[in-house]
Amino acid sequence: MTTEKTRRVGVVTNILAANDRVADENRRLFATKGLCVINLISSPGAGKTTLLEHTLPALAQRGIRAAVIVGDIATTRDADRLAVHDVPVVQICTEAFGGSCHLEASTIRMGMDQIDLDGVDLLFVENIGNLVCPAEFDLGERAKVALLSVTEGEDKPLKYPLAFQESDLGLITKIDLVPHLDFDMDALRENIETVNPKLPRIELSARRGTAMEAWLGWLEEQLAATRA
Ligand SMILES: Nc1nc2c(ncn2[C@@H]2O[C@H](COP(=O)(O)OP(=O)(O)OP(=O)(O)O)[C@@H](O)[C@H]2O)c(=O)[nH]1
Ligand SMILES: [Mg+2]
């Protein structure tokens, strides 16, 4: 017998299955173009845009051509911050279609249509600030990166495990603030390992430039693997 509950589960399953089909199409398109796509996921304010502000000039210096699709519920503030770095930037505001708290494969398709992908090596997706829903949606990306800032607390990987289980890299951000906080870095490392023992980790401060070389090196590895 179909109950209200099973119908709701069915709807969610259908949404994810429909998303997966478009994600597969995106993946094929990215492969055809040799485009490396990196999906940045975090709660609001963990430092995604700041990291990109410091990453884009460094990539340009290395001759790597980047572009960004940035999602927010409202405003073009992040796109405005990133566009000064002279890379193609598309802002998607989901308030125009219901205020969705995550980007889906079809929204990425809409963003891609605004960029000449033939001139791009690395496409960043800055997902909407939310540590939960974005992890559920495959965009066809090469890699997901979960950012967690030290001000959010050591327990967050345990409470919101999916982002850390689905990601290919964990970035602990804003480590310059650690001396000012009552924060236990070892506990955070342990909690990440508990939910995903295989997740590589970089502990960085975009503001101070700490471990930016490790992050840029990881991006270069992703780019090389995309083209292999
Ligand atoms: N101290 C310190 N502050 C940082 C660092 N990175 C980001 N911030 C600050 O954290 C705040 C939020 O940074 P954003 O880069 O806007 O965060 P975001 O993840 O893009 O935020 P949303 O797009 O709204 O989800 C800003 O005030 C930044 O200046 C860092 O490495 N160290
Ligand atoms: Mg941002």
Image: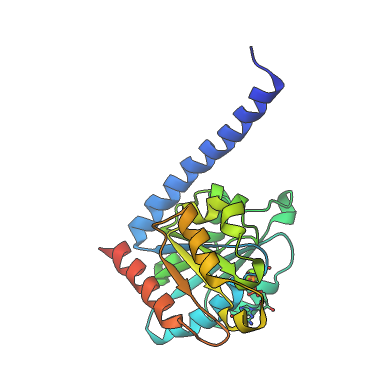
Q: Quadrant of ligand 1?
A: bottom right
* Residue 195 pos. (x, y %): 49, 53
Vertical placement of residue 213 versus 183, above or below? below
* Residue 56 pos. (x, y %): 50, 80
Looking at the image, residue 151 sits to the left or right of residue 108; the answer is right
Is residue 24 in view from this perspective?
A: yes
Q: Residue furthest top?
A: 1
Vertical placement of residue 129 versus 221, above or below? above
- In the rendered image, the quadrant that contains the C terminus is bottom left
The picture quadrant where one finds residue 91 is bottom right
Please name the residue shown 34% across and 62% down the image. Answer: 34
Describe the colour scheme in one phrase: rainbow
Please name the residue shown 41% across and 56% down the image. Answer: 197
Along the line of sight, the residue nearer the viewer: 147 or 27: 147
- In the rendered image, the quadrant that contains the N terminus is top right
* Residue 61 pos. (x, y %): 41, 87
Along the line of sight, the residue nearer the viewer: 21 or 47: 47
* Residue 98 pos. (x, y %): 74, 48
